[in-house]
Amino acid sequence: MTNTEIEQFRAETKGTAERIHFNNAGSSLPPDVVIDTVIKYLQEEAVFGGYETEVKYSKQLDNVYALIAQLINADANEIAIVESASMGWWIAFNGVGLQKGDVIITCEMEYVTNILGFLHAKKELGVEVKIIPNDAGGNFCLQALEDAITPQTKLFAFTHIGSTAGNVMPAAEIGKIARKHNILYLLDACQSIGHLPVDIKEIGCDMLAVTGRKYLRAPRGTGFLYVRKEVQDSLKLMFMDGFSAPKVTNSDYVTRSDARRFELYERSRATTLGLGKAIEYLLNIGIEKIWQRVQYLAGIMRKQLAAIDGVQVHDIGDQKCGIVTFSVNGVNSYIVKNKLAEKSINVSVGKAHSTLFYMEKHNLASVVRASVHYYNTEHEIQVLCEVLKNIY
């Protein structure tokens, strides 16, 4: 990206003038056009009515599915719009129809929401959960995954990018193993969509759960679920209404023939349009350019943080992303976060339970998480480091 492009992106994002935002893995600053889109729709609802405004914008609302499909190289009939990655993940996970004796294989990078799903299935259904740990270098062992497979293995459930670590899982290689053994594959991609290129056909997963608020720069309360066409009929529905099951008689019903069967009728049309506008904004830039910029900035941040006495960078693994985790010796992570906030620098704290398997393995109670996006600058990283030097 050129400096001119970066300045343009910053000019189109009001928040960059107010603070240094290194909490993109939590919730990115949205482009102004995304906010304007949501507000304009809500204003029209207030004047013309909710149903009437929806009819007016029906083509634009339907086009959001096409934009999502373009983003991940899927078909529009494989997309359901949901409120969050967690909602999408639970719809998919509960739809699998796990039974006693089934085995789930996962990794140490899993989110707390997903871990709760595993524990609930273990407690209520009697399933078994196998965790494949990363090696000493922080890399996932594909051979260990192969070795763990048995005839009882029903599901691969993996997180593409963890919450409190800077490494990326080999999602496509896992997909090849899933296809080889005909095992359902659920991928949590809440941190990766908008962050790095994701081609659903290359990855080969059956289900993909995504949030809008993180690297997509979309409004909070938005997300989507991808379900491969070939497996849609095999997933149980958690809930139904007249939208998901439009054909109803006194004795039977027929669900939709596409992934929108996993939706309910009532959701925010305004934020749906905001999600679409955020994806459109991203596509106009190009995800490859974004990924290169994010890697570049994260590399600079790790190098500069590691050079500060008393600061320890915790990221390991060959493939690192835009999430940078560190701690300051003798200083609680929340104190570090608050000190940075006093200087208008946003970071987050990765808590132990957020990525429970990983944090326990590495004896980490918490870490400071600074996550960069393409609109951040080298100067902002320098400011962060100067504040940290004074903290220690």
Image (cartoon, grey):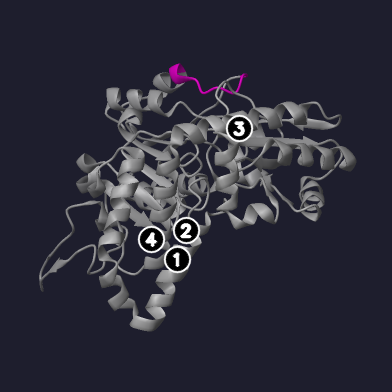
- Amino acid identity at mark 4: Leu
Provide the residue designation for mark 4.
273
- Amino acid identity at mark 2: Val
Q: Is residue 140 magenta?
A: yes
Provide the residue designation for mark 3.
166
Label 2, residues with CA under 10 Å away: few <14, some 14-19, many ≥20 = many
Looking at marks 3 and 2 on the same chain, the residue that comes earlier in the sequence is marked by 2
Q: Residue at x 68, y 29 (%)?
A: 300
Provide the residue designation for mark 1.
38
Looking at marks 1 and 4 on the same chain, the residue that comes earlier in the sequence is marked by 1
Label 4 near label 1: C-beta < 8 Å? yes
Above or below residue 293? Residue 78 is below
Label 2 near label 3: C-beta < 8 Å? no
Q: Is residue 76 magenta?
A: no
Magenta part of the chain: 136-143
Above or below residue 51? Residue 381 is above
